[in-house]
Image: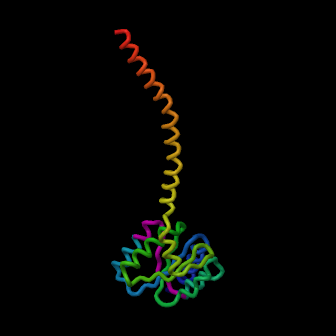
Amino acid sequence: MDRTEKRAFVEFLTNVFGSTSTVIVTHNKGLTVAEATELRQRVRAVGATYKVAKNRLVSRALDGTQFDGLEPLFKGPTAISWADEPVGVAKVLVEFAKKNEKLEVLGGALGNQVLDANGIKALAELPSLDELRGQLVGMISTPATRLAVLSQAPAAQLARVLGAYARTGDKEAA
């Protein structure tokens, strides 16, 4: 990278750090091209980005952002992932790290709150935003369904009573 490319990359990362809500730092211990491609695809599938970057450039981009507390994590071969929805990217990275010892989750930040590796693992155990939405819709629709059933129950009972009365009336006429 020449100076112009480095400057552009630092500006790009500064914009990313200014607009995202979650950054996760990982240690890449020799992932093969196929493994890195698979990881990038999984991360992209949850709406996040995975990027290997030079520590010095990332440190410059972090300076003055809400994520500047992450700077001590940038030692050795690191990569960063960022997303607006924190749980999905954390799940992908933690699951991948469990299956592949060449990737280690070092930590990250959720807003201005710095998290260690255990914090990222705890974040990965939370339900995702889509799962929470599904649970909320289920909770809201269940009472509505019960209300509809209960409001129809008196009418159904009245119809059964009238039907029974009509059947007894038919027997008396015969």
x then y, percent, for residue 51: 47, 78
- Taking the magenta stretch, the answer to whether it contains residue 45 is yes
Reply above or below: 71 against 173. below
Of residue 66 and residue 121, the one placed in the foreground of this image is: 121
Vertical position of residue 39 compared to residue 154: above or below = below
- Who is closer to the viewer here, 151 or 113? 151
**Image coordinates for residue 153, horizontal then vertical, percent:** 48, 33
Q: Is residue 22 magenta?
A: no
Most extreme residue toward the top is 173
Residue at the extreme front = 172
Closest to the observer: 11 or 49? Answer: 49
Residue 15, x across and y down, in percent: 59, 73
Q: Which portion, as a residue range, is magenta?
A: 42-55
In this rendered view, identify the residue nearer to me: 94 or 149: 149
Image quarter in which the C terminus is found:
top left
Q: How many numbered badges does the structure rendering display? A: 0
Write the residue at 61% across / 73% down.
111
Residue 130: image location, x then y, percent: 49, 59
- Looking at the image, which residue is at 50% across and 74% down? 122
User: Is 79 situated above or below 165?
Assistant: below
- The chosen color scheme is rainbow
Instruction: Tell which residue pokes out farthest to the bottom in this image.
Output: 76
